[in-house]
Amino acid sequence: MRFLRITTATMPHKFQLLAVMAFGLAVLFIEKQIQDMDESREVLERTVARHEVAEAEQWRQRGEVGGPASSPLHRADGGDEDDLVVIYNRVPKTASTSFTNIAYDLCGKNRFHVLHINTSKNNPVLSLQDQVRFVHNVTSWREMKPAFYHGHVAYLDFSKFGVAGQPRYINVVRDPVERLVSYYYFLRFGDDYRPGLRRRKQGDKKTFDQCVATGGPDCAPEKLWLQIPFFCGHHSECWNVGSAWALQKAKANLVNQYLLVGLTEELEDFVMILEAALPRFFKGATKLYRTGKKSHLRKTTEKKPPATETISKLHRSDIWKMENDFYQFAQEQFHFVRAHAVREKDGELLVLPQSFFYEKIYPKVS
Ligand SMILES: *[C@@H]1O[C@H](CO)[C@@H](O)[C@H](O)[C@H]1NC(C)=O
Ligand SMILES: *[C@@H]1O[C@H](CO)[C@@H](O)[C@H](O)[C@H]1NC(C)=O
């Protein structure tokens, strides 16, 4: 600026005017150049982006989902599957720990995260504000994806919270009386999983038979009402013991909202089908389950099977009839899925390979 001031001061007015005009023109010219450069940079960026998309498509078509691992633009594998969230809203005492341990054993090798949802006092119903927090958190927490969440939480419908991306729900159900008996002894004697932990009813030596005979609260038919409300969800009516609406809702959710619901009694088949349907998480699960069966099994200590009179007394209650109806429904659905997913060969179950393909694809690519 100093130089400009000195030179203009020594110049006649006419030249000064010319100099200002020339300067103005120069500025306009430079501005135009910058604008052109911006435009050509945008064109270049669009071209690069288009090229990347085309390349990703090619990788996908060749079956190498995601492309080369070395390129930072492509994730090592999975593609869309790296956004997967699986929620296992486990019902207490359905052998859920055995299955959850498989997820913990696989998460390192299959590269996904496992998170336990610890609800205060094990309350399966979340407050409305916690529902909003949970749904928002699960769907937007990128660093945790892909993720496997598990916890004793009732089914939560993500679709009414206005978020993009739905989790895949999975679960396991068990014969309702067996589940209750298991829970009864678990509260009194704990299990071999955390043997040191003091349980709520520890010291109470009463057997399940004695409890039912004397009409104790811990074995009352109302205590059977658990798998229905867990599948029914966060509606008031779900927790009204004996509600026919809750039973219908639980059944509808089981078939519409759950990717797969297995049975405690047939856990290995559940693991096998899950591995075939969700390999991103469960690749290697069946092998792990078979070899580590003993280490994955968690046994409630001192469990005595209930007497026939005890069972028939519980079977006379309407609540058992409904919970059993739900259990039978789940069983039938699982067997249907299994019949279409596996074949028996030499006494072993084998997962069926892909049995559909595409044809008559138009318009033809030249
Ligand atoms: C949940 O958290 C509480 C408080 O930290 C803890 O005492 C409890 O053991 C946890 N529950 C489970 C199942 O880990
Ligand atoms: C989800 O919650 C965790 C723990 O409360 C927090 O650390 C994380 O930042 C949250 N993520 C999002 C995306 O809200």
Image (cartoon, helix red, strand yellow):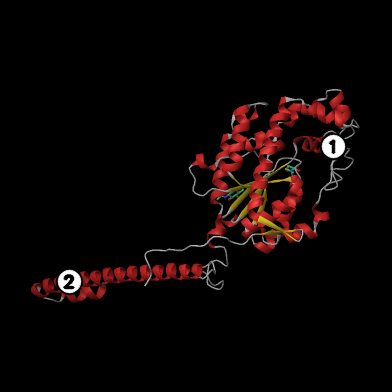
Q: Quadrant of residue 47?
A: bottom left
Task: Measuring from the top left, give residue 111's x and y in whole percent.
Answer: 64, 62
Residue corresponding to mark 1: 185
The residue lying at 56 percent from left, 59 percent from top is 82
The crowding category of the residue bearing disc 1, from other C-alpha atoms within 10 Å (few below 14, some 14 to 19, many at least 20), is many
The numbered dot on residue 101 is: none
> At label 1, which amino acid type do we have?
Tyr
Seen from the viewer's position, the closer of residues 60 and 42 is: 60
Asked whether mark 1 and ligand 1 are closer than 8 Å, the reply comes as no
Q: Quadrant of residue 123?
A: top right
Task: Measuring from the top left, give residue 334's x and y in whole percent.
Answer: 66, 46
Task: Measuring from the top left, give residue 284's x and y in whole percent.
Answer: 70, 62
The residue lying at 56 percent from left, 36 percent from top is 129
The residue lying at 60 percent from left, 32 percent from top is 248
The numbered dot on residue 25 is: 2
> At label 2, which amino acid type do we have?
Leu
Q: Are marks 2 and 1 in contact (CB under 8 Å)?
A: no
Q: Earlier in the sequence, mark 2 or mark 1?
A: 2
Seen from the viewer's position, the closer of residues 25 and 244 is: 244
Asked which secondary structure carries label 1, the reply is: helix
Looking at the image, residue 18 lies above or below residue 92: below
Q: Quadrant of residue 118?
A: top right
Looking at the image, residue 336 lies above or below residue 345: above
Does residue 29 appear in this view? yes
Task: Measuring from the top left, give residue 78's x and y in whole percent.
Answer: 57, 63
